[in-house]
Image: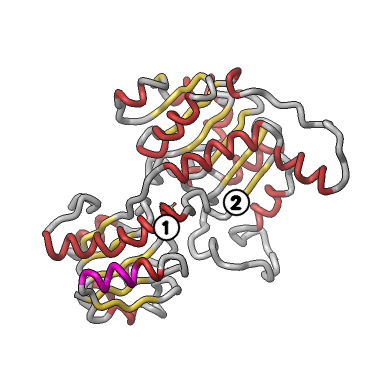
C-alpha cells in the first residue's frame, strides 16, 4: 500500500512516518497542499491524506482517481472541503479525522472568558501603561445564558465544562441527546438567539448552515451579544458581522475561523500588501481593529494530544478501508 500525505506539519511528520512503518505502508509526504501543481505526487498511491487546505476541485479529484487513489482521508474532523457526491460518483471513498473534543472545547471556554472579561482591552491597555479599569467592567458567567449551536461531541464538551460555571445553558441541534439534557435545555434557534448573552458555534458547515449568522439572525439576538466562532468561518456572513460590530449589536466577537481561509491560514502572510477590499483578509484587518474583536489563526484544535490523533487518523482511515473494507470514520457512501 502506498500513501501520499499532504499538508504535513513538522509535529505530525514523525507520527505519520512511524505509523506507516508499523503498518508496512510506503509513504511520500510533503508540507504542501494538494493542488494542480502537486497532485502528480499521488500517482500510484492507494490513498491520499490531507488537512483542510487542499484544493478538491473536480479536476483534482478526477486526476487523483486516474492516478489510482481509492481513499481520501482527512486528518481534520470537518470534510466540508470536498464535493462528497462528486467523489462518490468517482468511487473515491472518504474518511474524516478523529480527535478528542477537549482541545477545541477548552479553547472555546477560554474564548468566552476572554471575551466577557475584556481580555484584549486589558492586555492592550496594560502594554501601553494604561493601568485603569476604564471599559473593563465585566459580567460573571453564573449570571449569563450561554447558547451552544451544535451540540455534537465538541458542543457537548463545551456544555459540560461550562456547567461548572453555573450559567444557564441553551442548546440547539437537529438531533437531541440525553447526555446534553443533563446540563442544557434544548430550544429552537430563535429562542436561543433571543435569550443568550453568549452564543458559541459548533455546527458543521453545509449548504443549510452557510452564512447562518447573517443580518436576520443577528437582529434576533440580544444587544451586546458575545459571539464565538471556533468552528467554520463560512457559518458567518462577514459583512453582517462587520455591521454587527459597528452598530454594537455584537458586544464581543471571538473568531478562530474566517470565511475563505482555506489556503491562507497556517501560512505566513505578514509581508503581504493588503491592496483591495476583495482580498479575503482585508475585512479581517478592519474587524481586528476593534478592541472587542479577537481573531486567532484556526488553532483551537492545536494540542499535542489532538495533533497525534489527527496524524494517526489520516493513515488509519486509508488502511482500514483498504484492508478491512470499512472504517468507523468513513463518510457514508
Ligand atoms: C478540523 O479538524 O475540522 C479543524 O477545524 C482543524 C483543521 C482545519 C486543522
Main secondary structure found in the magenta portion? helix
10 Å neighbourhood of mark 1: few (<14), some, or many (≥20)?
Answer: many
> Where's residue 252, x and y in %?
65, 35
Label 1's element?
A: helix
**Which of the numbered marks, if any, corresponds to residue 55?**
none
In magenta stretch: residue 133 = no
Disc 1 within 8 angstroms of ligand 1 (CB): no
Quadrant housing the N terminus? bottom left
Q: Mark 1 sits on what residue?
A: 307
> Where's residue 11, x and y in %?
46, 65
| Residues rendered magenta in the picture | 16-23
Q: Mark 2 sits on what residue?
A: 296
Gap in Å between the C-alphas at discs 2 and 1?
Answer: 18 Å
Question: Can the viewer see residue 34?
Answer: yes
Write the residue at 18% across / 60% down.
320
Sequence order check: which comes first, mark 2 or mark 1?
Answer: 2
- Tell me where residue 61 sits by quadrant: bottom left
Amino acid at each position: 500500500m502506498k500513501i501520499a500525505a499532504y499538508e504535513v506539519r513538522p509535529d505530525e511528520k514523525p507520527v505519520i512516518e512511524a505509523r506507516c512503518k508499523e503498518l508496512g505502508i510506503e509513504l511520500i509526504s510533503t508540507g504542501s497542499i494538494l493542488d494542480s501543481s502537486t497532485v502528480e505526487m499521488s500517482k500510484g498511491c492507494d490513498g491520499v491524506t490531507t488537512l483542510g487546505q487542499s484544493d478538491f476541485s473536480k479536476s483534482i479529484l478526477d486526476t487523483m482517481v486516474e492516478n489510482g487513489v481509492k481513499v481520501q482521508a482527512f486528518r481534520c474532523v470537518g470534510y466540508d472541503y470536498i464535493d462528497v457526491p462528486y467523489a462518490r460518483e468517482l468511487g473515491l471513498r472518504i474518511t474524516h479525522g478523529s480527535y478528542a473534543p477537549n482541545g477545541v472545547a477548552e479553547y472555546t471556554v477560554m474564548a468566552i472568558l476572554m471575551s466577557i472579561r475584556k481580555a484584549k482591552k486589558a492586555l492592550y491597555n496594560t502594554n501601553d501603561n494604561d493601568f485603569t479599569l476604564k471599559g473593563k467592567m465585566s459580567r460573571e458567567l453564573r449570571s449569563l445564558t450561554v447558547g451552544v449551536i451544535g451540540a455534537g461531541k465538541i458542543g457537548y464538551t463545551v456544555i459540560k465544562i461550562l456547567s461548572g460555571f453555573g450559567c444557564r445553558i441553551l442548546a440547539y441541534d437537529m438531533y437531541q441527546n440525553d447526555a446534553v439534557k443533563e446540563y442544557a435545555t434544548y430550544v429552537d434557534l430563535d429562542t436561543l438567539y433571543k435569550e443568550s448573552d453568549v452564543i458559541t458555534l459548533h455546527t458543521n458547515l453545509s449548504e443549510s448552515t452557510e452564512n447562518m449568522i447573517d443580518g436576520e439572525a443577528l437582529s434576533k439576538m440580544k444587544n451586546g451579544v458575545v459571539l464565538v466562532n471556533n468552528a467554520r468561518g463560512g457559518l458567518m456572513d462577514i459583512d453582517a458581522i462587520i455591521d454587527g460590530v459597528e452598530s454594537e449589536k455584537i458586544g464581543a466577537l471571538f473568531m478562530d475561523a474566517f470565511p475563505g481561509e482555506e489556503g491562507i491560514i497556517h501560512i505566513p502572510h505578514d509581508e503581504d500588501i493588503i491592496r483591495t477590499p476583495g482580498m479575503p483578509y482585508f475585512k479581517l484587518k478592519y474587524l481586528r481593529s476593534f478592541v472587542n474583536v479577537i481573531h486567532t489563526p484556526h488553532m483551537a484544535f492545536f494540542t499535542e494530544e489532538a495533533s497525534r490523533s489527527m496524524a494517526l487518523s489520516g493513515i488509519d482511515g486509508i488502511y482500514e478501508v483498504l484492508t478491512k473494507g470499512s472504517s468507523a470514520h468513513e463518510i457514508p457512501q
